[in-house]
Image: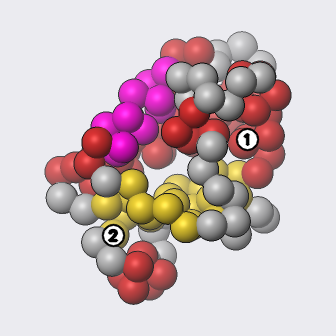
Amino acid sequence: MCGIQFILATTYKEAYKEETFVEFEEGIHSYLLKKEKDPANKFGLLLNLDMYGETILYRDEIKQLIGICEGLIHTYTKEDKDQQVRRFAKDLKWLCMEAIQRKKHVFAIGD
């Protein structure tokens, strides 16, 4: 399935060997883009990631992602698809908290 894998690592080499990741599925991405209408909004950092490229997120961006995850968890509560959004946001928030605690980066690698 296409999407972005969020991986906890220090280098690209380590990221490509890591087997633990959080998947930002294309279906969830599309759903959020439709619901949010403006990709530059409060969830912009997440929604504007390149689905086919590679991005390294550093400490400040990781903190932003934690805020985005909290916003998603509180905003998306009604529909069935919202539960998938919430599950993804909780998993990504956990990964981001681990990155800060372990002093690592989050690699966003598209398929």
Q: Earlier in the sequence, mark 1 or mark 2?
A: 2
Please state the horizontal and vertical placement of residue 63, each as a whole percent of the image: 31, 37
| Measured Cα–Cα span from mark 1 to mark 2 | 24 Å
In this view, 68 is above or below 21:
above
Q: Residue at x 82, y 28 (%)?
A: 34
Is 102 one of the magenta-colored residues?
Answer: no
User: Which element carries disc 2, helix, strand or loop?
Assistant: strand
Residue stretch rendered in magenta on the structure:
61-71
Please state the horizontal and vertical placement of residue 60, each as a whole percent of the image: 28, 42
Q: Quadrant of residue 5?
A: bottom right
Q: Residue at x 65, y 56 (%)?
A: 50
In this view, 37 is above or below 55:
above
Compared across the picture, whether 88 is left or right of 31 comes to left
Magenta stretch prevailing secondary structure: helix
In this view, 12 is above or below 7:
below
Question: Mark 2 sits on what residue?
Answer: 9
Q: How is the image coloured?
A: secondary structure
Q: Quadrant of residue 1?
A: bottom right
Hey, what amino acid is under mark 2?
Answer: Ala
Compared across the picture, whether 60 is left or right of 50 comes to left
Compared across the picture, whether 13 is left or right of 22 comes to left
Around disc 2, counting alpha carbons within 10 Å, would you say few (fewer than 14), some (14 to 19), or many (20 or more)? many
Question: Mark 1 sits on what residue?
Answer: 28
User: Which element carries disc 1, helix, strand or loop?
Assistant: helix
Please state the horizontal and vertical placement of residue 11, each as a whole percent of the image: 33, 77
Hey, what amino acid is under mark 1?
Answer: Ile
Quarter of the image where the C terminus is located: bottom right
- Check contact, mark 1 vs mark 2: CB within 8 A: no
Residue 107 visible to the viewer: yes
